[in-house]
Amino acid sequence: TQLLEQSPQFLSIQEGENLTVYCNSSSVFSSLQWYRQEPGEGPVLLVTVVTGGEVKKLKRLTFQFGDARKDSSLHITAAQPGDTGLYLCAGNALGDYKLSFGAGTTVTVRA
Amino acid sequence: NAGVTQTPKFQVLKTGQSMTLQCAQDMNHNSMYWYRQDPGMGLRLIYYSASEGTTDKGEVPNGYNVSRLNKREFSLRLESAAPSQTSVYFCASSEQGGGETQYFGPGTRLLVL
């Protein structure tokens, strides 16, 4: 059983549509990170959220950390083919030195 | 500034063979990690090293050993490879642990027959 549950596992949408990826847990996290991974490469950090209720924007990507710091979401507005990739959430639970990763959401944006 | 480098990129082993995966970082980071990535499982931590001279088990350490050779290098050894160890292996580093950004290498794709 993974500490962080991501949904959906796969998402295929048309260019210009919006999408949301969810990351949920029963544990409280000190911080939560979102990474994007492209085929054949390692994950690359997109954002870190630290404060409950925090919202961060990165161009067309909006990240939200739940008030109770147990969940997070990633929303992409007007998706483009360049947004295609595997999106991973990761968090360090309170008092834990290590990061735990979700299983990932594979996003495909069709032109 | 190469970041995190891993060798080899690909490897095919027969069951029972041994090999060492090499990882080096040039960012002067204290912490280094080894993960494996399998379809539908995300990244699972094998071992980590919080600082030079220390190593600790992660979630899936069985069948692996590690060495933190110096601050830059962290190697992962498979003493007797098994088909269940077929996976993509990623090395990562961070300045410290916890919620610090982790920087990943490009991965090593390992197939054990």
Image (tube, coloured by chain):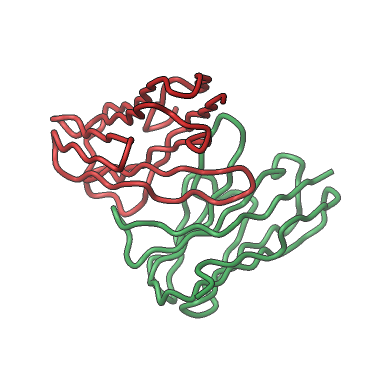
Chain colours: A red, B green
As rendered, which of B59 and A30 lies closer to the eye? A30
Q: Which residue is drawn at 32% across and 65% down?
A: B96
* Percent position of residue B74, x then y: 55, 69
Q: In which quarter of the image is residue B27?
A: bottom left
* Percent position of residue A56, x then y: 22, 40
Question: In the drawing, does residue B51 fall left or right of residue A54?
Answer: right
Question: In the drawing, does residue B11 fall left or right of residue B69?
Answer: right
Q: Which residue is drawn at 56% across and 25% down?
A: A111
Q: In which quarter of the image is residue B101?
A: bottom left
Q: How many labels does the image show?
A: 0
Q: Quadrant of residue A70?
A: top left
- Residue A91, compared with residue B9, is above or below; it is above
The C terminus of chain B - image quarter: top right
* Percent position of residue B55, x then y: 46, 65
- Residue A108, compared with residue B95, is above or below; it is above
Q: Which residue is drawn at 51% across and 36% down?
A: A86
Q: Which residue is drawn at 61% across and 32% down?
A: B39
Question: In the drawing, does residue B8 fall left or right of residue B60?
Answer: right
* Percent position of residue A102, x then y: 43, 34
As rendered, which of A83 and B82 lies closer to the eye? A83
- Residue A84, compared with residue A11, is above or below; it is below
Question: In the drawing, does residue A102 fall left or right of residue A10?
Answer: left
- Residue B72, compared with residue B40, is above or below; it is below
